[in-house]
Image (cartoon, rainbow, N blue to C red):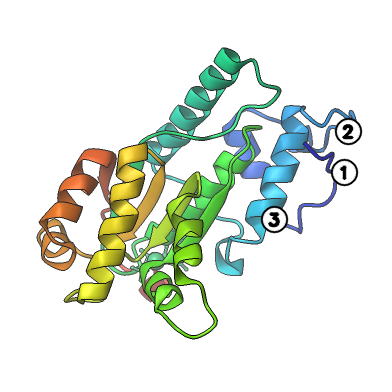
């Protein structure tokens, strides 16, 4: 692992995430030149995910206990695998997925990026890809000069994936159905942890995604129904 010097975290506020884990805000800056230290792994991981977290969510901190438990579970599994393999660092490879459901503006994307940020400061290595479902379909549409299958594999095979706004587009097309099935089936079979958000309710989700996808989502995901109103109206 490459050594990442301190003070390279692009102005993101990490103090509340570290405090929630009982760590001092300066913990992540500990400067011991050990490339495998948890602090160096956290700096490395955070600088990777900082490029993926949209500016609006750069200070998101998860508030739902289920998200904290999910992060803790991934960390524990990664550490068990590290001990079994006797490897110098722990990295997230397997685990359960989450499906955050709730109305527009309730805070699903905020919680998802909060969880991503929190996982990044645990000292466990994680590799993410993030997309909205609509952007994913757009990126995968066959077009000249683009290897859509290579692009698909980037999302399919990433250890951790956030798919925001799944099922937002109403009636699925044959193309979106195929993408959903191939992506979700692959991640289901391999227990690859995925965060899904959707503002469809449970019945709409089945109509929009079909039986085979919703059946797999039911087994692979813990469902979290977020209660509340559109926070954007209050702003
Ligand atoms: N716990 C929170 N603390 C502070 N701000 C929050 C919190 N949760 C959400 N917000 C803010 O509320 C707004 C709506 O949140 P968010 O974008 O996560 O909603 P959403 O459920 O993803 O909505 P949509 O379904 O439209 O995508 C955002 O400005 C977000 O930053
Ligand atoms: Mg959202």
Residue 149: percent from the left, percent from the top? Answer: 44, 66
Q: Is residue 135 left or right of residue 81?
A: left
Foreground label between 1 and 3 = 1
Q: Which residue is mark 3?
A: 12
Q: Which residue is mark 1?
A: 5
The quarter of the displayed image where residue 208 is located = bottom left
Q: Are marks 1 and 2 in contact (CB under 8 Å)?
A: yes
Decide: few, some or many residues near mark 2? Use Cα within 10 Å; few <14, some 14-19, many ≥20. Answer: some
Quadrant where the N terminus sits is: top right
Q: CA distance from mark 2 to mark 3?
A: 19 Å
The residue positioned 74% from the left and 42% from the top of the image is 43
User: Please, is residue 155 above or below residue 81 in the view?
Assistant: below
User: Please, is residue 129 above or below residue 34 in the view?
Assistant: below
Residue 96: percent from the left, percent from the top? Answer: 35, 36
Q: CA distance from mark 1 to mark 2?
A: 7 Å
The residue positioned 51% from the left and 50% from the top of the image is 114
Foreground pick, 104 / 35: 35
Residue 134: percent from the left, percent from the top? Answer: 37, 74
Numbered disc 3: secondary structure: loop
Give the mark nearest the N terminus, 1 or 2: 1
The residue positioned 59% from the left and 41% from the top of the image is 126
Residue 169: percent from the left, percent from the top? Answer: 25, 76
Q: CA distance from mark 1 to mark 3?
A: 16 Å
Could one spot residue 66 in this view of the protein? yes
Q: Which residue is mark 2?
A: 31
Give the mark nearest the N terminus, 2 or 3: 3
User: Please, is residue 106 above or below residue 37 in the view?
Assistant: below
Using the image, tell me which numbered label, if any, was put on residue 199.
Answer: none
């Amino acid at each position: 692992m490459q050594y990442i010097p301190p003070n390279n975290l692009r102005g993101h506020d990490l103090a509340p995430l570290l405090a929630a884990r009982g760590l001092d805000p300066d913990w992540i800056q500990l400067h011991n030149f050990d490339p495998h230290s948890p602090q160096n792994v956290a700096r490395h991981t955070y600088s990777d995910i900082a490029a993926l977290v949209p500016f609006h969510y750069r200070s998101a901190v998860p508030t739902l206990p289920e998200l904290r438990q999910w992060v803790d579970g991934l960390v524990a599994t990664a550490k068990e695998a590290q001990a079994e393999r006797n490897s110098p660092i722990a990295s997230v490879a397997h685990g359960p997925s989450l499906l955050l459901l709730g109305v527009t503006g309730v805070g699903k994307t905020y919680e998802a990026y909060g969880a991503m940020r929190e996982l990044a400061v645990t000292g466990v290595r994680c590799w993410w890809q993030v997309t909205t479902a609509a952007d994913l379909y757009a990126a995968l549409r066959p077009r000249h000069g683009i290897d859509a299958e290579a692009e698909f594999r980037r999302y399919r095979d990433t250890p951790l994936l956030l798919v925001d706004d799944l099922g937002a587009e109403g009636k699925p097309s044959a193309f979106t159905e195929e993408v959903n099935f191939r992506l979700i089936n692959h991640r289901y079979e391999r227990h690859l942890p995925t965060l899904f958000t959707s503002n469809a309710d449970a019945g709409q989700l089945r109509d929009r995604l079909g039986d085979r996808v919703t059946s797999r989502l039911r087994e692979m995901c813990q469902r979290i129904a977020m209660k509340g109103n559109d926070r954007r109206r209050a702003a």
